[in-house]
Amino acid sequence: MTGYLLRRVAQGIFVLLIVTLIVFGLLQLLPGGPARAVLGSRATPQLIAAFNQQNGLNRPIFVQYGVWLGHLLSGNLGWSYNQSQSVASLITERLPKTLALTITSVVLALLVGVIIGTIQAVRRNKLFDYTSTTIGFFFYSFPPFFLGLLLVILFAVDIHLLPAEASQSSSVWAILGDPRALVLPVLTLALGGVALFSRYMRSSVIDNLVQDYVRTAQSKGVGQVRLLMVHVLRNALLPIVTLIGLFLPVLLSGAVVVESVFNFPGMGLLFWNAATTRDYPTELGVTVLVGVLTVAGSLLADVLYAVLDPRVRYVRQ
Amino acid sequence: MSEFEPGAERLAPGLVTAEPVTVTDHDVDHTGGDQPWLFRSLRVFAANRLAVVGAVIVILLVAFCYIGPLVYHTDQISTNLQDAHLGPFTDGHPLGTDELGHDVLGRLMVGGQTSIEVGFAAAALATVLGTAVGAIAGYFGGILDALLMRIVDGFMAIPALFIVIVLGTIFQPTKGLLIVVIAGLSWLITARLVRGDTLSLRTRDYVEAVRLSGGSGWRAVVGHIIPNAIGTIVVSGTFQVADAILLLASLDFLGLGIPPPAASWGQMLSSGINYVYDGYWWLIIPPGVAISLVVLGFNFLGDGLRDALDVRLRN
């Protein structure tokens, strides 16, 4: 188990290094280099030269990378001149809100997806199975921005049931305290997930229903409900754990779109506003963080999987 | 039989490749005797109702975008503010007009051309690149494989949308650039899947035979591994088209796609969003439905092709 974990963590760290290399590469692509990005488009060549001298940007590229990586590791993501604030503090302000949004969405998507998928598996090739499959395929194909707009038109413009804009409060508690404003953004993010999770849950449950342990349990006289809830569900949920890790990048890019549709003051909107104002330090800071979150998420999913499924531990050893 | 999982391969390559890779029967004769295989595949495909629906959706949309403008003439270039924001079915505009007086139905046709062209070109490029990287990594193995796969992992860790947005703020997007960028970010999953196939194919006798008879690795990859992994390549290529169109639409929606006066579905949606509260639904629903339909079509199609080509499901 520890051997597996250590290997997995080492691999994760290596992938993180690649992530930083990619973002460092993007930094080098900036028009006029990092100096221009920080000083703005009207900076004089003298100013740029002085800035390069001061920040070591005239040194060899791998030294620059080392320095930049050192800054990253110490939590220094750069300075947003547009907003006169450090990128790290901008992100710390917004991240909790995005987490609140995405975690709520994922929990909702999981709950609904698992329930629908299980019912589909039990009553497979019946009416419910077909209809939910078709509806799921539609939701999966809807681009999140279109889904968000549809929900706004339906629930905010036509019948004024729910607000079309998220709470603009600076505190995450105020945002959570205004559940009505959260409904549409959460639904937009969750519906695609419901389609995905129910799909996998359906095949996972079907796979498990034909296993020997199910027959054993049945022959022991275990009731249908108990069989499903206690025996099958636990096993069928295993692949879903991996799926959550893989769903993370989808969720984070969904957050950019959804936050800009609903003006939700989270990290996605921060990134989006940074992009429209060419605030490169903020853009790249968020990009690095998203990479870290994704790697950490899939690592966590794998670890959780190993904890939940003893076979992984023994096989890998 | 037709177990479809939306984007199974794309989202969960780990789940798919974790199973023992069974690329068996394509190993059959590619030298003329593949007629029965082709027919059998076509039969399985035709029997899969969703796949046929997908193919029909895609064909109808392509016809709509390319044959439509030949029949239904509209002016999508000059601005005509007098006719702005006309509702559907007024003055001969079946879907109304937008804020610049362009006929929405005609714009839908022209805009669709952009989406479909970029989608196909990016998917084709990504598939070629992914196939090459996957086959090379899988065949040669060792450090090269480890390095290439970690690069894939690294790029997969940063969602494509983020990188595309950063690039979109650095460069002025053109059609060609968008194709290259989208392809440059979408080859990853194809590479993983093809690598998985290659790992099992390279131990086959006929590949061994090439090696033993002194054939180059290049010859084994191009002549034997890639033709036998063709099912995987085609299926993932089909899903790539859907993904590329979706990514392009997100970019257009955020204003980082192809700039006007060129039209695209995402861009139409993006300008329509300003009029949500005015009730001009015809600026939003038609392009949104078009994007969803084309994505749905390619997802159905990819799924059907997987059933038709995937040997695991064939007898």
Image: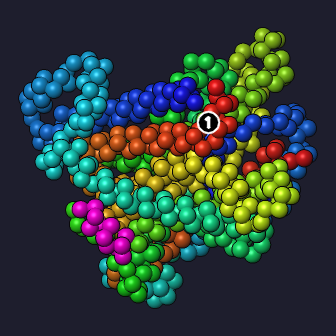
Task: Report x, y in % for residue B259.
Answer: 36, 57
Residue at image location 36% in from the left, 32% down from the top: A20
Q: Residue at x 37, y 49 (%)?
A: B165
Q: Secondary structure at mark 1?
A: helix
In the picture shown, does residue A203 fall above or below A285?
below
Q: Predominant secondary structure in magenta?
A: helix
- Give B64 or B276, whichever is nearer the viewer: B276
**Does A116 lie within the magenta span?**
no
Q: Chain of mark 1?
A: B
Outermost residue to the front = A220
Q: Which residues are magenta?
A: A171-182
**The disc labelled 1 sits on which kind of residue?**
Arg
Q: Horizontally, is A244 left or right of A99 in the view? A: right
- Relative to B223, A18 lies left or right: left
Viewer can see residue A188: yes
Q: How many marks?
A: 1
Closer-to-camera residue (A315/A65): A315
Please tell me whether residue B218 is drawn above or below residue B189 in the rendered image.
Answer: above
A58 with respect to A245 (left or right): left
**Image spot of residue A275 (x, y percent):** 29, 51
Q: Does the magenta run of residues contain A172? A: yes
Q: Quadrant of residue A268?
A: bottom left
Q: x%, y% of residue B190?
A: 61, 40
Q: Which residue is mark 1?
A: B192
